[in-house]
């Protein structure tokens, strides 16, 4: 279950096996059977291409554009299945057995190719949603909010641990009653010593569908911050990945609503209360930020622009223009109790205008080069932010789309500016 399915050893092996099986299934005793197999493969590929076109271009079931690479792998997978089915007819029993075995091999090869394109899963545990972290040990951490910035020579530790720690915590929904799942928290190396300094805090919000652990398993934020801390004497922000969804298939839009519950209250009050009563953190709003992907990116930008008194920065990878369920009418009816004006006011552009000019806010917008829809959103939001007096950067990830590769690019290229804004840079 922990075998890396995103690395060359596995990818090359499964592709080689798939090719060998395809060649075997294609080679038949007569040219008519070879032709039948080839026609079945082409027919399967067309079925795969049609399904991608139907789900993406016609119904837009996933809400994002699927890339040509994903389309290719789906088509190849269905081509293999078509070829295998053709071998069930007018063939010996052992050929039928090999054809049956080849179908899951073709499916695995196609899944692995799509997975690399999306950059999502490292292993099967990630794919089925197994959280690989134990309960967090808070060590010497204690609840204390300290005025000032995070960087202080007086609290620099001589020999911090090499890596931080990641673990699960339960954050009670005391005020909101929101049905949140367990959160995941990262403590940087400098927080693990006997006298941890007051550190900045970075919320990390997954996409939808998703779970808090996604920001660590697919987003690799823990690994990135360990590398950052190694260059900064163990310093990095504390990362708290709360559950803003309440379930993988839910989208509360990080607002309070009758339909989905009080997601905003949970994140802004319950989660913040847990942080300040369990961790040593800075009181400076500039030391608090939000990092999010897709739905989580929209939430990140929402909080940064609507609550500059609480958050000084945001990293938004593939954000929408505002809270949405993908359909304006449905969004207004479900999330805003039928109020069109409340929906409009909650969109990011109008919110920025209402709060302008901002005194000390930074937002980094990221999008994939091959993701036309969200790239356009990012450019619009970046322009709106600059007009509102927000310091804003726009990052376009080369060769990626609406996927975790874009998330990691946004984190890698956007976090240094956020770190400086948080006071981590000397």
Image (spheres, helix red, strand yellow):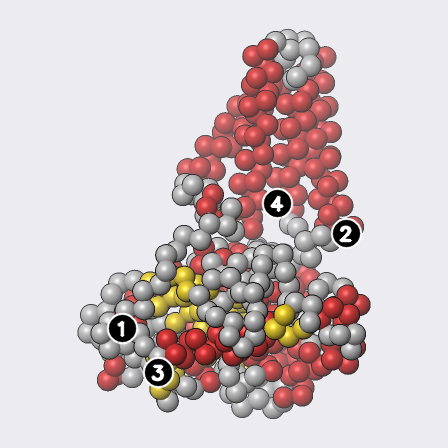
Q: Which residue is identified by label 3?
A: 144
Distance between the alpha carbons at the discs numbered 1 and 4: 48 Å
Disc 4 element: helix
Task: Reply above or below: 133 against 284.
Answer: above
Taking the image as shown, residue 264 lies to the left or right of residue 157, namely right
Q: Position of residue 341 (x, y in %)?
A: 77, 81
- The answer to whether one can see residue 426 in this image is no
Q: Which label lies toward us, 2 or 4? A: 2
- Name the residue at 47% across, 58% down: 213
Q: Residue 192 shows which numbered tag?
A: none
Along the horizontal axis of the image, is 68 left or right of 149?
right
* Tag nearer the camera, 1 or 4: 1
Q: Is residue 274 above or below residue 251?
A: below
Q: Picture coordinates of residue 132 (x, y %)?
A: 41, 52
**Residues under labels 3 and 4: Cα distance?**
49 Å
Give the mark, 2 or 3, whose residue is nearer the N terminus.
Answer: 2
Image point (69%, 14%), residue name: 89
Badge 2: few (under 14), some or many (20 or more) residues near its Cα, within 10 Å?
few
Q: Report whether 96 appears left or right of 336.
A: left
Q: Upstream in the sequence, badge 2 or badge 4?
A: 2
- Pointer 2 with pointer 1, Cβ within 8 A: no
What whole-number distance in Å separates the C-alpha atoms at marks 2 and 4? Answer: 20 Å
Residue 69: assigned label: 4
- Name the residue carrying label 1: 140
Q: Earlier in the sequence, mark 2 or mark 1?
A: 2
Residue picked out by circle 2: 59
Where's residue 286, x and y in %?
Answer: 46, 84
Horizontal and vertical percent for residue 364?
54, 73
Q: Earlier in the sequence, mark 3 or mark 4?
A: 4
């Amino acid at each position: 279950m922990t075998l890396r399915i995103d690395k060359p050893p596995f990818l090359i092996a499964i592709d080689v096996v798939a090719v060998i099986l395809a060649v075997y299934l294609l080679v038949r005793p007569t040219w008519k059977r070879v032709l039948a197999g080839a026609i079945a493969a082409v027919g399967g590929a067309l079925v795969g291409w049609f399904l991608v076109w139907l789900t993406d271009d016609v119904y837009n079931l996933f809400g994002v554009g699927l890339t040509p690479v994903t389309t290719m792998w789906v088509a190849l997978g269905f081509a293999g299945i078509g070829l295998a089915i053709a071998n069930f007819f007018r063939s010996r029993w052992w050929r039928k057995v090999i054809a049956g075995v080849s179908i899951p091999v073709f499916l695995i090869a196609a899944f692995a190719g799509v997975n690399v394109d999306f950059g999502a899963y490292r292993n099967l545990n990630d794919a089925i949603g197994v959280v690989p972290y134990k309960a967090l040990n808070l060590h010497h951490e204690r609840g204390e909010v300290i005025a000032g910035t995070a960087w202080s020579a007086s609290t620099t530790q001589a020999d911090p641990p090499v890596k931080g720690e990641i673990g699960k915590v339960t954050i009670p929904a005391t005020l909101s009653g929101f049905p949140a799942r367990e959160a995941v928290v990262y403590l940087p190396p400098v927080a693990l010593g006997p006298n941890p300094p007051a550190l900045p805090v970075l919320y990390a919000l997954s996409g939808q569908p998703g779970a808090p652990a996604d920001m660590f398993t697919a987003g690799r934020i823990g690994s990135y911050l360990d590398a950052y801390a190694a260059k900064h004497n163990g310093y990095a922000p504390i990362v708290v990945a709360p559950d803003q969804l309440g379930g993988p298939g839910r989208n509360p839009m990080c607002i309070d609503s009758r339909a989905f519950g009080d997601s905003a209250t949970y994140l802004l009050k319950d989660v913040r209360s847990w942080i300040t009563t369990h961790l040593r953190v800075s009181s400076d709003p500039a030391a608090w930020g939000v990092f999010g992907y897709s739905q989580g990116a929209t939430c990140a930008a929402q909080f940064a622009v609507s609550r500059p008194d609480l958050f000084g920065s945001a990293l938004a990878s593939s954000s929408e223009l505002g809270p949405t369920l993908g359909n304006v009418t449905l969004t207004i009816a479900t999330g805003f109790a039928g109020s069109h004006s409340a929906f409009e006011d909650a969109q990011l552009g109008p919110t920025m205008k209402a709060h302008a000019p901002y005194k000390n806010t930074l937002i980094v917008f990221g999008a994939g080069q091959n993701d036309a829809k969200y790239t356009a959103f990012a450019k619009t939001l970046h322009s709106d932010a600059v007009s509102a007096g927000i310091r804003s950067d726009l990052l376009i990830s080369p060769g990626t789309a609406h996927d975790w590769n874009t998330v990691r690019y946004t984190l890698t290229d956007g976090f240094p500016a956020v770190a400086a804004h948080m006071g981590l840079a000397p």
